[in-house]
Amino acid sequence: MNKKSKKIYDKAIDYFEKGKINKALEICELELSKSLQNSNMLNLKGLLLYEKGDLNEAITVWTINKDINKNVIAQNYIRNAQGDKKRLELYKDGEKALKQLKIDKALELFKTCSESDFNGIKVNTGLGLCYQKKGNFLKAKEYIDKALKLDENAITANVVKKELEEANLYYEAKKSSKKVIIILVILFIIAGIGISSYLIIEKKQIKNKMIEEHQNNNEPQIEKNIESSSEIKSEQNNKDVPNLKTFDKEKMKALIENNDLDGIYDEVDNVKEESLSDDNKEIYKQAINLLKSDGVSKFYEYGLWYFNQENYDNAKNQLDKAYKYCEGNSLKEHIIFYRASTASNQSDSKSALSQYKEYYNQYPNGAYIEGVLYELSLLSNSENKEESKKYANELVTKYPNSVYVNNQIKDIMNN
């Protein structure tokens, strides 16, 4: 491995050790797009996929390395992977037991899965959920920490972490990196560690009240000693417009560096770009661009997770955050639909009607249009029967075989 390649490889390892597994994968994929002759990078990518639970993808990467580069280590990975396929069934059984609240059985199965490092994120999360159900919160924290050390953005693990924070049983500890990937390589070669499987855990039983996003409601303190004329102007603008925050450039830099999307969202909220100095505007734009890319995706995923758990208050909070910066993002259609569905489930008919109309106007042939026409017809029936009939008629005419064409829709059309 030449010096440049080693530097890139070390950067990927560094990201992984900081819990940024997806960033590490991005580096691997970018480097491998240039050449598939980098054996170390191929093996690393396989191991990262292995940690995420993507068994078939990991085997594919190692097979490429074996065939193209005649790499012996990759051959060992492939051979060892075969012996762990049985763990897929054990994991399925554990997931099923957890959903049925057979906690002791699930715990035993997940412990068996944890004998391999494969799918460590989800297995550790499953163990954390089991211990949380049993009331052993400190043990739950131990396993949630392990999951988040592998992937700081793991959705289910972060939700459990919030619940533990609500119970005042979570604290931030400094992560001591142990060169996990290097250990995995050694274990694979010496001990022939088996590889299990990957499935998404859906936690069906969660508390009704989740910890709310921390919001800073304190009025900002205006610095007294400002030398720059541009900063004086910025301060004056903030005074003239009520409820605006001052912009802490250094704090924002730190938030961007740590990819703290929630913190960035809170900091830019109620900050007007035109009130900032040119120097601050540059940092502000970086923050907004990050929210428009990574932020929208994260907030939407969390919103959808809460929605599926029927936790509509938190779903609304996350989806509203995603909506604010979703313009031009491919997720916009989904965000609009689930915001409307959330409002409907909260019995907020006015908001639901408005948001379903927004979807209808922007995506008349969208993926959710049948359900949207159905909801629009029902929601508008009490206030505007002609409009309700219009939506019902469009649903029946365009989608006569739709599951949404039921007796309610037929009654609206005939009345």
Image: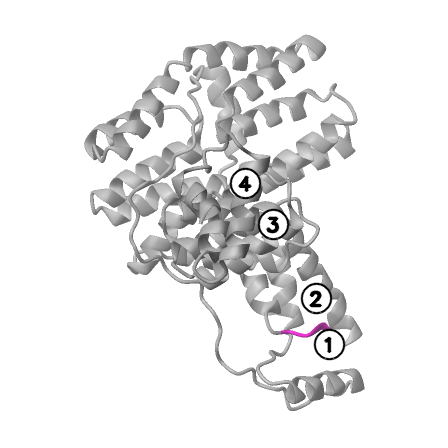
- Please name which of the two marks, 2 or 3, marks the residue nearer to the observer: 3
Give the CA separation, mark 4 to mark 1.
49 Å
Disc number lying in front (1 or 3): 3
Residue 315 in sight? no
Q: Nearer the viewer, residue 371 or 118?
A: 371
Q: Which mark is residue 284?
A: 2
Please name the amino acid that badge 4 sits on.
Leu
The tag on residue 395 is 4
Instruction: Give the percent coordinates (x, y) of residue 225.
Output: 68, 90
- Amino acid type, mark 3: Tyr
Assess whether residue 274 is covered by the magenta stretch. Answer: yes
For label 3, count other residues whose C-alpha is less than 10 Å away and answer few (under 14), some (14-19) or many (20+): many
Q: Disc 4 vs disc 2: which is toward the camera?
A: 4
Q: Quadrant of residue 410?
A: top left
Query: Foreground residue, 283 or 298?
Result: 298
Identify the residue under disc 3.
360
Horizontal side of residue 235 vs 196, given as left or right: right
Distance between the alpha carbons at the discs numbered 1 and 2 = 9 Å
Q: Are marks 2 and 3 in contact (CB under 8 Å)?
A: no
Q: Which residue is mark 1?
A: 276
